[in-house]
Image: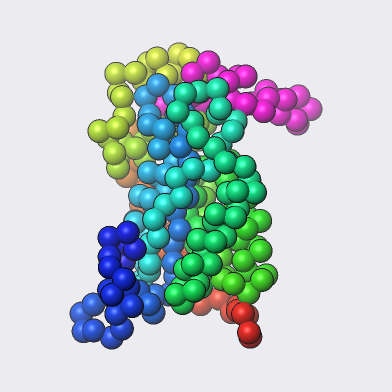
Amino acid sequence: MHLAETTWTDAERRGDPGEADPADADVALLPVGSTEQHGPHAPLGTDTLAAEAVAARGAEAYDGEAVVAPAVPVGVSEEHRHFAGTLWVSPDTFRAYVRETAESLAHHGWDRVVVVNGHGGNVDALREVCARLTRDGVAYAVPFTWFDAVETDLGMGHAGPMETSLLLATRPDLVREGRLDEAAAGGAPRWGEWEAGVNLAYDSAEFSANGVVGDPREGSEHQGEDLLDAAGEGLAELMAVVADREWRGKGE
């Protein structure tokens, strides 16, 4: 059940034969992404689109009932500030938004929450806010970052083969395939500038002329389908564990 596509009366429906019962759903999914540069070939909403696609596939693969919330489209992305169209909020603002959205889900009884993440810059903040929600007894919440949950020989990079593959499988209309050579030529081989285990660069413009890391030409629709299947299956497995895990909620 996708909340953005249902009505409030359906959201509280209970026990109607043949109807999903979101009020009694085992797990709620909250996709989070970003609006940030992804080179000259991929859209600014790449991370949000990925989170939504993985959440949808996970809900489909899950052997139970799930509620899918609308995505949070702006994340912790200041590292891409030099590229036009990039939007960002502070980690504090991001944590507060995610927390209060999860609190809203818990208010309706959906207090097992998996935050489905599509942006690396959100990872630290999500771990913190999910821990706080859980420790405060609001909701049992865990973050799931899709590209950390799959095994592949493709390099993640940024707007590289993994993200480009997933887009080719889910939103090929948004990939500017005629710009893939340009994306590869202006990209960097890896993220950051490293010395003694320290990344000296804070912003992506310091090491990538067009924001790309990796070679997106190595991606394909077929690889994207495999990535989506693997991420969705991994998410469904996590959802089952979250639904069954012992947790002391508020008042327990």
Which residue occupies 29% across, 80% down? 13
Q: Quadrant of residue 165?
A: top left
User: From what the image shows, is residue 242 above or below residue 217?
Assistant: below
User: From what the image shows, is residue 18 above or below residue 31?
Assistant: below
x and y, in percent, of residue 194 in the image: 71, 25
Which residue occupies 54% across, 37% down? 88
Single out the residue that lies furthest toward the right. Answer: 196
x and y, in percent, of residue 25 in the image: 39, 75
Which residue occupies 27% across, 74% down? 10
x and y, in percent, of residue 115 in the image: 50, 58
**Image: magenta residue range:** 188-217
In front: 129, or 58? 129
In front: 208, or 197? 208
- Pick the quarter of the image with the N terminus: bottom left
x and y, in percent, of residue 140 in the image: 57, 70
Q: Main secondary structure of the magenta part?
A: loop
